[in-house]
Image (cartoon, helix red, strand yellow):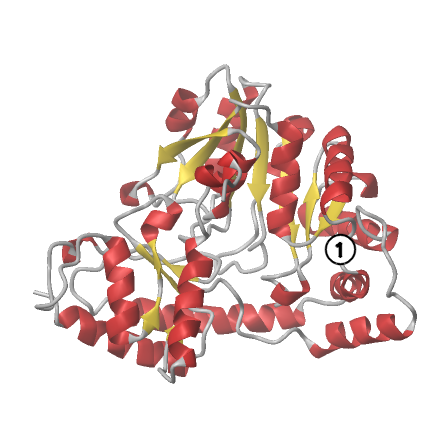
Amino acid sequence: MQLAQRLNRITESQTIRMTKLGRELKAKGIDVIDLSIGEPDFDTPAPIKEAAKKALDEGYTHYPPVPGYPELRKAIAEKLKKENHWEVSPEQIVVSNGAKQAIANVMLSLLDPGDEVIIPTPYWVSYADITKLAEGTPVFIHCGFEQQYKLRPEQLEKAITAKTKAIIYSSPSNPTGALYSKEELAALAEVLRHHPQVFIISDEIYEYINYVGKHESITQFQDLIPRIIVINGFSKGFAMTGWRLGYSVSPLPIAKACDTIQGQFTSGANAFAQRGALFALESNRDACQHMVNAFRERRDFLVKALQSIPGLRFHVPEGAFYLFPEVKSYFGKSDGQQVIQNADDLAMYLLNNAYVSTVTGSAFGEPDCIRLSYANSLDKLQQAVERIQKALKALH
């Protein structure tokens, strides 16, 4: 069967693949501990669920407007003004079926064949493939361990060419948990001021999962606002992954383009889910803070536990719920049956021998690392560490 050539440009999401492999082992009766998936293990807060149930009873079962209900877009705009000190009109907001679709809408709206998108590595797995689907060219900038996996201004300056159309990054970061400080963002902003053709796509989906203080966004640099696009959503901070609700905030011409594209792909996001999201935004953030407190406790446990395992080095995450240890000291070692050549091998070794599901760092553009999600209970994390420690000790 002759399939479209575009399929040759992309690969299966490794996070989804590892989760799928773990589920296959679980289906065989094996007790797999899942540290691969980027999903809060908390259930959606009950009042949000009740708001969606109420919306069903009130008749929110029909097609919603493509860019989202006006009330929800207005609430997002009010959230941005109150929490981020950024004034936008509701018309600049497009509610989508998850933040992933919001990114796809933006890339399809911006990119022509050959346009370049700068992607600092490590990066979230789908940035590159969505860029390729939109016929753009990813330009990777390696940001190593010594720079805490964060982009430096001199690297950005060097990477920009006449073909550069956009830069996309996340803060808090998936997969590293790193945050850009106000000073670091200011240094990047200074470079971008000299390149007015470059759009700035800031993925802030982990905004609420922050362990060190106030969320810092590139939107605070007002002169860049006409080129800034923010991606956000409800999956992480509100534990609403299955609801599939994200949004983009962009200059009005781009928002209108996203509206047009989404109208041809999916139309509007789930009607009653949007009403639940509206309730979430208009409520206090107590449930969010409860989750952050739990994630911080788990982070602290995992950091201390993994520090006792020889050959791992990592930075303490400042946000999100991932640890991203460098594991290259295990490359070339063997348990007598399998030689670990790279992080891909190590992730599969841990899955098949320790029954702990992780994700290879190569999926994020950093082949010397693996990603561990601590969106799991402390009990499960303790068991996972014991299994990992035993499996790594068997490698010589």
Q: In this view, does 391 lie to the left or right of 222?
A: left
Q: Where is residue 25 in the image (x, y as percent from the top left)?
A: 37, 76
| Residue drawn at 91 percent across, 68 percent down | 59
Q: Where is residue 72 in the image (x, y as percent from the top left)?
A: 81, 55
Identity, as a three-letter code, of the amino acid under mark 1: Ala
- Relative height, residue 361 to residue 379 (above, below): above
Q: In this view, does 136 lie to the left or right of 56?
A: left
Within 10 Å of disc 1 (Cα), the crowding (few <14, some 14-19, many 20+) is many
For the residue pair 269 and 304, the one nearer the viewer reads as: 269
| Residue drawn at 19 percent across, 76 percent down | 390
Q: How many labels does the image show?
A: 1
Q: Can residue 93 be seen in this view?
A: no
Label 1, on which residue?
269
For the residue pair 271 and 307, the one nearer the viewer reads as: 271
| Residue drawn at 88 percent across, 65 percent down | 60
Q: Is residue 147 left or right of residue 278?
A: left
Q: Can residue 195 be seen in this view?
A: yes
